[in-house]
Amino acid sequence: MLRYFFLSVLIISSHFAFSQRIENAKGVEKRNEVFAKEKSPHTASILSAAFPGAGHLYIGQWYKSAIIWAGIGGGIYAINFNSKLHKEHKQAYIARLDDDPNTNATGVYATADINSLKENMDFYRKNRDLSIILTSFGYVLNIIWATVDTHLLYFDISDDISLNIRPSLNYFDKPNTGITLALTLK
């Protein structure tokens, strides 16, 4: 009976034996999971390139994926909106210029001035092009952001980094006094 008691105490207490921290090769404590593998920045980059936001899902930062999806989704919406209005203004402009009575512009554009149609067509084309550039920039920024966040995931932010200022005495040819700055890194 005593043997079963010690065996049960050993099993129950062994649960607390695994609560130690694991450090990687540089001696930096892992912050996410105790027995997790380190996340690869290369894998985060590939995932973000394949599907925007997937790199942040890979490293467990889902809220940043939502920001990326909102930004790129808004950019795609702006591209479609400006493309649609550019196309409508362009068709109305061409219908006004061809001198064919069967192809007159209808609806909102029937009474519009030809100069305003041309200005609006150029305005929506410029906005469409700008939306394409900004959405592409957001896509590239998504890849860079996932890579940098993965690199910084295991960055040492402990209190072991210190800068000490202390007086020093150097003996070369003759004794010199001065100040020494010592930066101590872990």
Image (cartoon, rainbow, N blue to C red):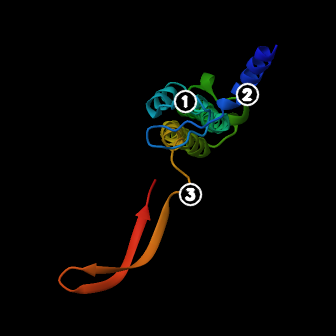
- The picture places residue 36, in percent across and down from the top left corner, at 57, 28
User: Going by the picture, which residue comes out furthest to the right?
Assistant: 1
Residue 172 left/right relative to 71: left
- Residue that numbered label 3 is attached to: 159
> Which of pointers 2 and 1 lies earlier in the amino acid sequence?
2
Identify residue type, mark 1.
Asp
Crowd tier of the residue under label 2, counting other residues whose Cα lies within 10 Å: few below 14, some 14–19, many 20 or above: few
- Nearer the observer, 65 or 119: 65
User: Going by the picture, which residue comes out furthest to the left?
Assistant: 173
Can residue 104 be spotted in the picture?
A: yes
Give the residue drawn at x 32%, y 81%.
169
Task: Kindly state the secondary structure of the residue where label 3 is placed.
Answer: loop
- Nearer the observer, 111 or 155: 155
> Which of pointers 2 and 3 lies earlier in the amino acid sequence?
2
Distance from Cα at disc 3 to Cα at disc 1: 78 Å
Q: Are marks 2 and 1 in contact (CB under 8 Å)?
A: no
Residue 77 left/right relative to 171: right
- The picture places residue 27, in percent across and down from the top left corner, at 48, 43
Task: Kindly state the secondary structure of the residue where label 2 is placed.
Answer: helix
Give the residue drawn at x 73%, y 30%.
107
- Residue that numbered label 1 is attached to: 99
Identify residue type, mark 2.
Ser
Task: Kindly state the secondary structure of the residue where label 1 is placed.
Answer: loop
Q: Which mark is residue 13?
A: 2
Q: Compared with residue 166, is residue 146 higher up or lower down, i.e. above or below?
A: above
- Nearer the observer, 147 or 80: 147
